[in-house]
Amino acid sequence: MGTSNHDDEMPVAVHGSTDAELGTDRLHRLIQAMVDVGSHLDLPTVLRRIVRTATELVDARYGALGVLDPTGTSLSQFITVGLSDGEIREIGDHPRGQGILGLLITDPEPIRLPDLTRHPDSFGFPPGHPPMTSFLGVPICVQGQVFGNLYLTDKQSGSEFSATDEELAVGLATAAGVAVDNARLHLRLRDLDLLEDRERIARDLHDTVIQRLFATGLSLQASARLATDPALHDRIQLAVDDLDATVREIRGVIFGLHADRRIAGSSLRRDLLRLGSELTEALGAEPRFRFHGPVDSLVTAHDEATSGDPLAAEVLVVVREALSNVARHARPGTVEIDLTVTGGWLELSVRDSGLRPPDEHETHRRNGGHGLENLARRAAARGGSSTFAPSEDGSHLTWRVPLDPPLG
């Protein structure tokens, strides 16, 4: 979508300033803004600095940066400037990319509107959202791919954003793309530095810790056979079972630590843990993840060997949908996610201890939600299955697909 055609010529003199002086001032501000967003290497800090700097650069009352999810079809993060903590809490869940925000996702070109509420694609505001009128949206690209979008609203020194504001925002977005790329490269280099230590820890766990646990378990089993007291025998057997469970969990950790150097910058485990941290506030507690089998190496090998939709991205979408359902329909409780890769299959299990979700048909009737149906369709498209079992004290979702989907 192109920009609007309004009276947006070069800025006129203000308070005695000449056109040249005002243009020089804007250029200086843009250069300073570019330097500012590129002065940090921590990605969360970079993202917040980008949206704050953009808001100041074009004199917007509100600003936001929406980061696209791995599928590139919706927003996974939404960083805002200008809203109070109380307003953010009252608004609730962050936007996913509908209405005006979705235009930049489907057509990543700058958008400038005098009144976003009058646009035919306007989706409206949720309860508690402050009114917004003028709008400027600009995509941020990293290495030729859209990373996210800048959304700026309510020009404070005028009725709407000008063509010059758009040029400034586009220039800043270019610098922002470089800053994001640098921050991600820095993170990858840090991961590579840690990889050697990770592999050493994995060897120590396998060669020392697991062997000692095995020896302890065998000793306890021998003691159990000699125990004449049934209660003592049962207690020893429980200890042996706990040791077996601990060994299985350590093996899962070892698989993660032994991640191939080729995928040091790409980790489904790490992305899932980040997703869990992102949704902790909405869930009321941080979800607990357990990984079984060579999750990173096999899933990444699958994605590299096939030309279809990446399985890792699909798993992230499924987990986000599952956790979002828990956040919407269950009161705070514990959430446990088990991801198992074995025997050519990937199985995802999501359990929560919150109160029973509303009946699925009632959910569809009230708000048009089709989350469980979408998960089932995603699984079926890959030759797998998805089951959901609600109960009075929680629910259990199982999503299971083959690593190699059926042909045809």
Image (cartoon, helix red, strand yellow):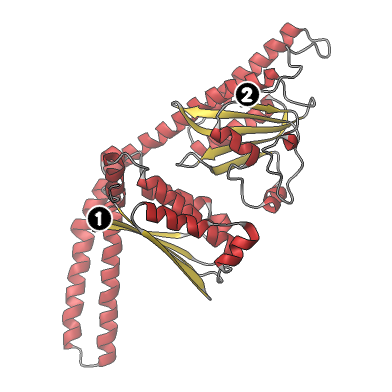
Say which element carries label 2: loop
Quadrant of the frame with the N terminus: top right
CA gap, disc 1 to disc 2? 48 Å
Q: Where residue 349 appears, x then y in whole percent? A: 40, 63
Residue 207 vertical placement versus 200 (above, below): below
* Of marks 1 and 2, the one in the foreground: 2
The quadrant holding residue 347 is bottom left
Residue beneath the point at 61% across and 42% down:
98
Q: Is residue 154 left or right of residue 111?
A: right
Residue beneath the point at 40% across and 51% down:
315
The residue that label 2 is drawn on is: 2
Mark 2 is on which residue type?
Gly
Report if residue 368 is visible in the image. yes
The residue that label 1 is drawn on is: 344
Report if residue 330 is visible in the image. no
Q: Where residue 265 appears, x then y in whole percent? A: 35, 38
Going from N to C along the chain, the mark reached first, 1 or 2, is 2
Q: Give the residue at the far bottom of this rendering.
A: 229
Relative to the observer, which residue lies in front, 197 or 172? 172
Residue beneath the point at 53% across and 53% down:
279
Mark 1 is on which residue type?
Gly
Q: Is residue 291 left or right of residue 93?
A: left
Say which element carries label 1: loop
Q: Give the residue at the far front of this rendering.
A: 408
Q: Where residue 129 appears, x then y in whole percent? A: 73, 46
Q: Is residue 76 left or right of residue 206?
A: right
Residue beneath the point at 71% across and 44% down:
124
